[in-house]
Amino acid sequence: MSYDFGGGDSYRATTDFAALDITGSALTIAVWVRPDRVNSGDAILCKWNNDFTAQQQYRMRCGPSGNVQCLVRGSTTTYEVNSAAAATISVWNHFGLNLSGTGANQFSAWLNGTQTTGTASQAIQNTAELASIAIEGTGNQLDGSIAELGVWNVSLTNDEMVSLARGTPPPRIRRNSLAYYVPFNTSAAALDLSGSKNTMGTVGGTPVFLENNHPPVDRWMPMPS
């Protein structure tokens, strides 16, 4: 089960809710993406306004080279890291962003369980920018499908990132630190199941619920004790 965005469809947050206002030097984003095109710069999850650096916080995209492109904005500088490999078109790929500090090699992009490291030397700034899925501002709409989106306000370990890429659903990993979770497994596209009771607000266009198109995620795994 997933949601398909056809390159001109999106839904986005209409409020700057606290759960996604993650600042400092610890952040993890993980999501399954089935792109219908690469070399696109299509948005996955953005809290980012290209026109104003004061409204830039973090951004994950399918980058212009088809890779996982991750950006965070500090007080004066933008930091970027890209996966070494490109995503494969028309199949499920697991995307990840992980920030564990401001030292060398503590900012990383993940593709299908493989890490590419970089550095973000400043903590993430706070902004009032809206969070959005499958769109960045009014452009870079995703042409493809998304499922099992999780955002944590901590840095997951490398083993945990690999586990997610192997099919562990986000709620099975550090549930108490899971700030936002949308599985895209019902027609209620904006339903957040993290326990924070967030909503994504306005739905734009006509994203399509695909009941029989889903990534290799084992939702029947037992809950951790």
Image (cartoon, rainbow, N blue to C red):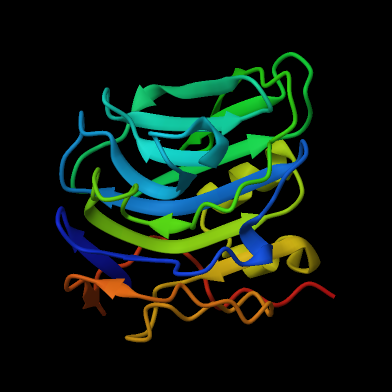
Q: Nearer the viewer, residue 126 or 184?
A: 126
Residue 146 in picture, x, y percent from top left: 34, 60
Which quadrant would residue 224 be assigned to in this image?
bottom right
Residue 196 in picture, x, y percent from top left: 68, 77
Judge left or right: residue 100 versus residue 130. right
Q: How many marks?
A: 0
Q: Nearer the viewer, residue 103 or 89?
A: 103
Q: Nearer the viewer, residue 9 or 154?
A: 9
Judge left or right: residue 74 versus residue 224. left
Judge left or right: residue 83 versus residue 171. left
Residue 56 in view? no
**Which residue is depicted at the point 70% across and 41% down?**
159
**Which residue is depicted at the point 73% across and 53% down?**
153
Residue 97 in picture, x, y percent from top left: 56, 39
Residue 1 in picture, x, y percent from top left: 33, 74
- Image quadrant where one finds the C terminus: bottom right
Residue 79 in view? yes
Residue that protrudes farthest toward the top in the picture: 104
**In this picture, is 11 found above or below 97?**
below
Judge left or right: residue 145 versus residue 201. left
Residue that protrudes farthest toward the right in the picture: 225
Which quadrant would residue 171 be assigned to in this image?
bottom right
Q: Nearer the viewer, residue 147 or 76?
A: 76
**In this picture, is 90 found above or below 115?**
below
